[in-house]
Image: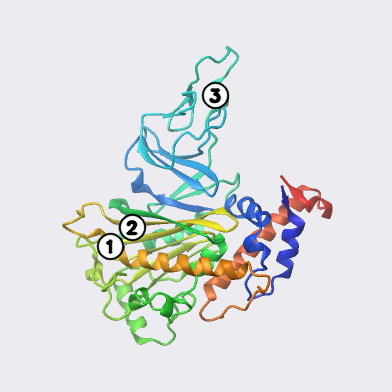
Amino acid sequence: MVDLTAIARLLDERRPGHSLPQGLYNSQNAFDFDMAAIFGRSWLMVGFAVELPRPGSWMAVPVGPWPAVVTRDRHGDLHAFHNSCRHRGSQICKPGKGSAARLVCPYHRWTYELSGELVSATRMPETFDPADHALTPIHVEDVGGVLYVCLADDPPDITDFRRQFEPMLAAHNLRVAKVAFESTLVERGNWKLVMENARECYHCATSHPELAQSFPTGASAHFDFGEDRRQELFAERMAAASLHVGPAEGDWWQAMRFILNDGFKSMTMDGAFAVKQLMCDLEGGDIGSLRWSIEPHAFAHATADQVLMFQAMPVAPNESVVTAKWLVHRDAVEGVDYDLRRLTELWTRTNLQDRDLVENNQVGVNSPGYRPGPYSPDAEALAIRFVDWYCRAARDFLDGQAVGQGGAKQGLRRVG
């Protein structure tokens, strides 16, 4: 049960341009609310189409505390389901990836097509109808080779995101890629602190000395460089190569191609490509980085030689799981075309540094002396954007609950 009145009160306390009240960062009530109001209603980045390479492929992913599974059926069509058997609810597929002709629950062997239909349930009465017990579907979309799921019955409109973003991503050829490496990091911090940290580079120059070599830490918002002739020349060069620069954005997403620092063609320790076989060879691969992000929980960078995905999932009020994936061209051979350590070193260091920052942030936020402070409008513009979006999404959910309860204030008290 969520105390919605308490959530509404905390949202009312939030001052524009300031961080959130303490209770939204560390209470069980806020965590339960966030799962229902935010993660239960948003498009979530869960991976890439190439992770389901052929009919029979499946990928089981946790959506916070909820298990989900994405499949490619015998016809090659994508599906997504709650990863919960329609018998007694057991998780059907353990987190990870695999291939199977059908999905079989490990408990009592109920068996499902990869398109969700129940095809076998032994020792059930004659009155039992398998058609009434298909897997419960969830929405799934493939946008430019990136997979998104939404658990809501009526998900946010994804049309504009697809229309604007797919042309920006197309040159990176994600459909001829492969996942070279995946890492998982547990962070003792609220998911919103993880994402606020991920949405700003105010801290980068001092906390990420390796990343700061390639990343333009002084830019603001959509990598606004001001009157920078270097960025103007970059934009002209990208336009001549038919590469979209942006910025492009909607309520819950944004994308921008930006120039890397002088001498850097990729986001690596030394600025050189980490992979010989490029995913995009336009302009000799000197195409900066295409960064896109979606609220509430993910961002990615696509350079000529690789794609890096960062995704955060809530686990508890003060715990989040961060998953990173590195994609390279599917024909690139480890040990020949790339060295795994060199490919992953920069972002591995950065993610570990961010984990320490988030965990230290959470300790301070838990203090009785914590008071919400002001963001830098220049250096933390995207953190402000994230928190403002969160507050709007939270209020939209509260308004929907009020309507559902006949608009009575008493009806806002609790929701199961």
Colour mapping? rainbow
Image location of residue 272, percent across then percent down? 23, 71
Q: Residue at x 29, y 69 (%)?
A: 268
Q: Is residue 40 left or right of residue 108?
A: right
Image location of residue 362, percent across then percent down? 57, 66
Specify whether residue 290 is in view.
yes
> Which residue corresponds to mark 2?
326
Rate crowding at label 1 as few (under 14), some (14 to 19) or many (20 or more) other CA atoms within 10 Å: many
Disc 3, disc 1: CB below 8 Å?
A: no
Q: Amino acid at mark 3?
A: Ala
Disc 2, disc 1: CB below 8 Å?
A: yes
Rate crowding at label 2 as few (under 14), some (14 to 19) or many (20 or more) other CA atoms within 10 Å: many
| Precedes in sequence: disc 3 or disc 1 | 3
> Which residue corresponds to mark 3?
131
Q: Residue at x 33, y 73 (%)?
A: 239
Q: Nearer the viewer, mark 3 or mark 1?
A: 1
